Amino acid sequence: KAGKAGPTRNKAALATGDAGTAKHHVPGKVVAFRVEQWRKWAANALMVQPERNQRVLAALVLAGDMRAVARERYADVATKVAGFKKAGSESLPLRRTLEQADRFDAGQAATLVQAVAAAAAYGIDNEGLEALLNYLEVDEAKTFVLGDSYLDLLTVSELESLAEEVGLRKAMGGAYQKARAGKRTDFIKGLLAVAGFAYAGAVPKAMRYPRRGFERADRAGDSIDSSPGESSAEAEAVE
């Protein structure tokens, strides 16, 4: 159901990299960071997959999860897309919002309908978020870029493990030990300054979401069992 914090089981799964990632402890700062990124990835995918967006919207209603829609975030999008006038932190009466919505042109209205499901990605609980990522087949390698926003969350020993995991240590060669011998900030700078290293798509296990199979319709009368694969490339996040 809706809410920022999911059930206890979900928190445990998020902290251990349950299903699809190696089971290891993930620091709390990394858990918070990755959930924020997962929400953004799901919202982006919903804005570039119109058919699945419609089905997600229907599923949210059927599951009683429409309260997951982050109203303030959605209102920000409506303001950006169509000049919607907010009333501070207060809710406007339906009559007022209908008057404003009636001024949206067809393109604006279509975008804002899609944005409903995308805004829900920011309010759904952990279990629902993982379901969205799997249904939308989000590919972390197409969305994640290894950078200082992630490395700044790690201790020196965690940086060492990361460098080994994603191949940075090997790519740095002899420069690795020199960078490691310096201060943590210098170590991070060294890790992020490796010529020719593909930081885009260098996804640590801790940033991957748990894979769950979906029974999907094949649109030919039968149903097939499907697991996540590639997602659509890029979209503007509902931020």
Image (cartoon, grey):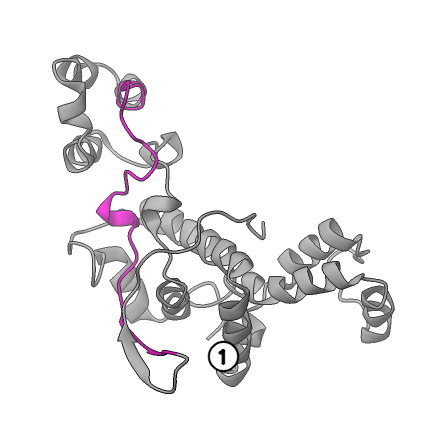
Type of the residue with mark 1: Ala
Compared to 224, does 42 lie above or below?
above
Question: The magenta stretch spans which residues?
Answer: 189-218
In this figure, which residue is indicated by the disc labeled 1? 59
Q: Is residue 55 magenta?
A: no
Element on which disc 1 rests: helix
Q: Percent from the top left, x then y, of residue 21?
A: 20, 55
Q: Quadrant of residue 133?
A: bottom left
- The question of residue 209 being in magenta is answered with yes
Tell me where residue 138 appears, x and y as whole percent: 38, 57
Left or right: where 168 falls relative to 70:
left
Vertically, is 222 above or below 135? below
Mark 1 crowd level (few <14, some 14–19, many ≥20, 10 Å Cα)? some
Instruction: Name the quadrant containing residue 112.
Output: bottom right
> Eyeballing the image, is 208 above or below 185?
below
Q: Is residue 17 above or below residue 176?
A: below
